[in-house]
Image: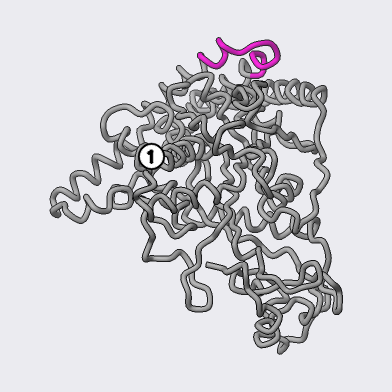
């Protein structure tokens, strides 16, 4: 959308009054009538058209970049994940902002809040959402019938609990060393929590609304469940393509995601961020998109150009609290690996591209988070050098976190979020030093988590025995 050969940018800036140096610093609190939309760039439309860099006016690169976030398990509503991520950015942006506006300075910009779009898939139990075209053709009786079939198949508490027992046994059996000890405490405690949740109607939703997401995606049974999983992947892909103004068939979209100054806006660079089960979905969807990009022939000009735009738009892939290592360990058939052309050394490699992060995939995990782990199992042989290459760079940020509950802490980890900003905005923000834990402290964290869950399991058993004895005595 933007023309980088803009020759009259300074004149345009003067006419529009949007140059950053004309706006007071954010820390200067304005009067209520001082309505300068560029002062607090809390909304995409508040980002100035131009900034000053290297002493001259340039088109604002922040307008071309966005963050695409895919949530994990839970009962999120549309927009919940993007809103949580945005609140974390509000705090992290203060640490990476290079400078405030300074009148007369050669360079003037502030780091705005990035445009965040939610790859929402949490309403998979609604056939009218996942199959809109089919839904429009059904009669009233068919809608009632298939709505019930779809919802019942998508939320089965008994199947989920039996599946959880089987998966837990496999995890303990295949574990090694400290990991096996950890899972010997964690898995039985999880079984007990789920069983108690099933006994009490008020907490039964924990099974159907959370654990069922995992069971459904990793181990679908029957035609309906397989269709639901495919539609989840399709929905995540379509939402990503909307940021680029591209339809599912790789043609240009006539329904833009957002408008700027009356014109449809297309983003050019996307940082793809995923959490928990969303990392598994995202891994598959990115692989599918890349394979599709390879299939489009040059003769199909519109779709071929859009395929190249998709390749160029993938700025970085960030995984938070990812179970990909455990999925590959327990359910290897679930994952669809990426084409070798896009791996390190490939002719279209996503690693080490000009003006892009050297490491395309960065993974954040906590030892106190039983879901996550380092993704060392994802590697390849560099096709150019013949050397082994780990696809993911693993980060473990410092700080004590409650075992188990730390799985939700990534949205508030300022170190991780500052890194996402750096990957998204590149040299326009400072590269914050990573406050990381050493390997020895990671082992200590794993042992601490095992002890914590052992105590928690004992307290739960004592409480359950006390409650049963009280009920029997009554």
Q: Nearer the viewer, residue 240 or 149?
A: 240
Q: What's the magenta region?
A: 170-182
Q: Quadrant of residue 388?
A: top right
Q: Residue furthest front?
A: 299
Q: How packed is label 1: few (under 14 Cα within 10 Å), some, or many (20 or more)?
A: few
Q: Nearer the viewer, residue 106 or 194?
A: 106
Please give the name of the residue rendered at 24% of the width and 46% of the height, measured from the top-left corner: 147
Please give the name of the residue rendered at 68% of the width and 81% of the height, measured from the top-left corner: 13
Snapshot colouring: one colour
For disc 1, the marked residue is 295
Give left or right: position of 292 versus 461.
left
Q: Position of residue 444 (x, y in %)?
A: 79, 23
The reply to whether residue 442 is in sight is yes
Give left or right: position of 288 versus 401.
left
Give left or right: position of 50 versus 433.
left
Q: Magenta segment: does it hold 181?
A: yes
């Amino acid at each position: 959308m933007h023309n980088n050969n803009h020759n009259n940018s300074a004149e345009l800036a003067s006419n529009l009054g949007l140059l950053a140096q004309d706006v007071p610093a954010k820390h200067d609190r304005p009067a209520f009538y001082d309505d300068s939309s560029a002062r607090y760039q809390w909304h995409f439309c508040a980002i100035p058209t131009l900034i000053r860099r290297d002493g001259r006016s340039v088109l604002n690169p922040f307008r071309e970049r966005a963050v695409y976030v895919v949530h994990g398990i839970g009962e999120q509503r549309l927009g919940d994940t993007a809103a949580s991520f945005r609140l974390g950015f509000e705090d992290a942006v203060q640490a990476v902002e290079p400078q405030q506006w300074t009148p007369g300075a050669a360079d003037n910009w502030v780091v705005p809040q990035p445009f965040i779009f939610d790859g929402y898939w949490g309403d998979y139990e609604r056939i009218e959402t996942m199959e809109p075209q089919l839904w429009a053709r059904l009669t009233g009786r068919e809608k009632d019938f298939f709505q019930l079939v779809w919802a019942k198949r998508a939320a089965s508490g008994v199947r989920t609990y039996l599946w959880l027992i089987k998966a837990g046994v496999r995890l303990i059996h295949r574990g090694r060393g400290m990991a096996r000890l950890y899972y010997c405490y964690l898995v039985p405690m999880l079984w007990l929590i789920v069983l108690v949740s099933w006994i009490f109607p008020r907490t039964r939703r924990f099974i159907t609304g959370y654990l069922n997401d995992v069971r459904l995606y990793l181990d679908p049974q029957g035609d309906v469940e397989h269709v639901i999983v495919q539609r989840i992947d399709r929905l995540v892909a379509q939402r990503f393509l909307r940021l680029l103004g591209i339809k599912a068939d790789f043609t240009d979209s006539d329904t833009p995601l957002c408008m700027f100054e009356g014109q449809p806006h297309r983003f050019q660079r996307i940082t793809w961020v995923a959490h928990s089960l969303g990392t598994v979905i995202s891994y598959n969807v990115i692989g599918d998109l890349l394979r599709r990009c390879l299939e489009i022939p040059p003769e199909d000009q519109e779709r071929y150009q859009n395929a190249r735009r998709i390749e160029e738009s993938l700025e970085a892939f960030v995984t938070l609290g990812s179970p990909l290592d455990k999925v590959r360990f327990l359910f290897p058939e679930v994952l669809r690996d990426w084409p070798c052309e896009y791996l390190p050394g490939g002719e279209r490699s996503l690693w080490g591209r000009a003006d892009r992060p050297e490491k395309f995939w960065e993974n954040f995990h906590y030892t106190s988070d039983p879901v996550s782990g380092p993704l060392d199992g994802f590697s390849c042989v560099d096709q150019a050098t013949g050397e082994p290459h780990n696809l993911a760079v693993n980060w473990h940020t410092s700080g004590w976190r409650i075992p188990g509950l730390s799985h939700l802490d990534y949205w508030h980890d300022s170190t991780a979020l500052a890194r996402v900003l750096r990957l998204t905005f590149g040299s326009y923000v400072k590269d914050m030093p990573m406050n990381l834990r050493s390997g020895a402290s990671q082992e200590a964290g794993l042992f601490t988590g095992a002890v914590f869950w052992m105590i928690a399991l004992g307290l739960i058993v004592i409480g359950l025995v006390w409650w049963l004895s009280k009920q029997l005595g009554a």
